[in-house]
């Protein structure tokens, strides 16, 4: 038995996507509250540019930014798209995850 037990609360993150002909967003929500946002713009019919990623300070350190980048990777794979990560956070996240290089 463990002598020091802590209650662990696991928060489910939901990511919603909106898009039009020129721009799109992935928005993360945790327990109904906006936790983060990734903005992208289309660069032709087969690729998009990640322009900006931001995380609500209240959700810092919870992996929100990484989950947004991962959602973009999944979207790219499902739709046979390529990603250009101009956002410094997204670019660094891609560099730390070599298994995502197929969408670059």
Image (cartoon, rainbow, N blue to C red):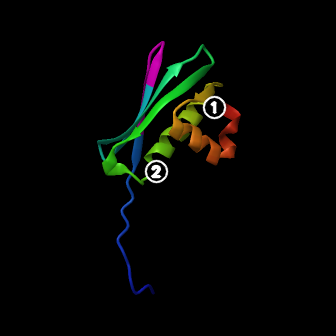
| Badge number at residue 63 | 2
Q: Are marks 2 and 1 in contact (CB under 8 Å)?
A: no
Residue 84 in percent (x, y) is at: 60, 27
Q: Quadrant of residue 70?
A: top right
Q: Can you say whether 55 is above or below 83 in the image?
A: below
How many C-alpha atoms fall within 10 Å of the one at disc 1: few (<14), some, or many (≥20)? some
Residue 74 in percent (x, y) is at: 58, 35
In the displayed structure image, the side of residue 26 where residue 77 appears, left or right: right
Q: Identify the element where label 2 is drawn.
A: loop
**Residue farthest to the front, as pictured:** 88
Q: Main secondary structure of the magenta part?
A: strand
Quarter of the image where the N terminus is located: bottom left
In the displayed structure image, the side of residue 79 where residue 67 appears, left or right: left
Sequence order check: which comes first, mark 2 or mark 1?
A: 2
How many C-alpha atoms fall within 10 Å of the one at disc 2: few (<14), some, or many (≥20)? few
Q: Quadrant of residue 39?
A: top left
Q: Which residue is mark 1?
A: 77
Quarter of the image where the C terminus is located: top right
Give the CA distance from mark 2 to mark 1.
Answer: 21 Å
- The stretch of residues the image draws in magenta is 15-24
Residue at (70%, 35%) from the top-left corner? 102
Residue 96 in percent (x, y) is at: 62, 48
Residue at (44%, 84%) from the top-left corner? 2
| Badge number at residue 89 | none
* Count of numbered tags: 2
């Amino acid at each position: 038995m463990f002598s020091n037990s802590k209650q662990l609360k696991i928060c489910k993150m939901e990511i919603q996507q909106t898009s039009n002909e020129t721009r799109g967003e992935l928005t993360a929500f945790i327990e109904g509250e906006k936790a983060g946002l990734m903005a992208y713009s289309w660069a032709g019919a087969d690729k998009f540019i990640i322009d900006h990623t931001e995380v609500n300070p209240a959700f810092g350190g919870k992996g929100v930014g990484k989950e947004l980048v991962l959602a973009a990777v999944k979207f790219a794979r499902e739709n046979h798209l390529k990603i250009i990560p101009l956002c410094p956070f997204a670019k660094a996240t891609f560099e730390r995850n070599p298994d995502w290089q197929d969408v670059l």
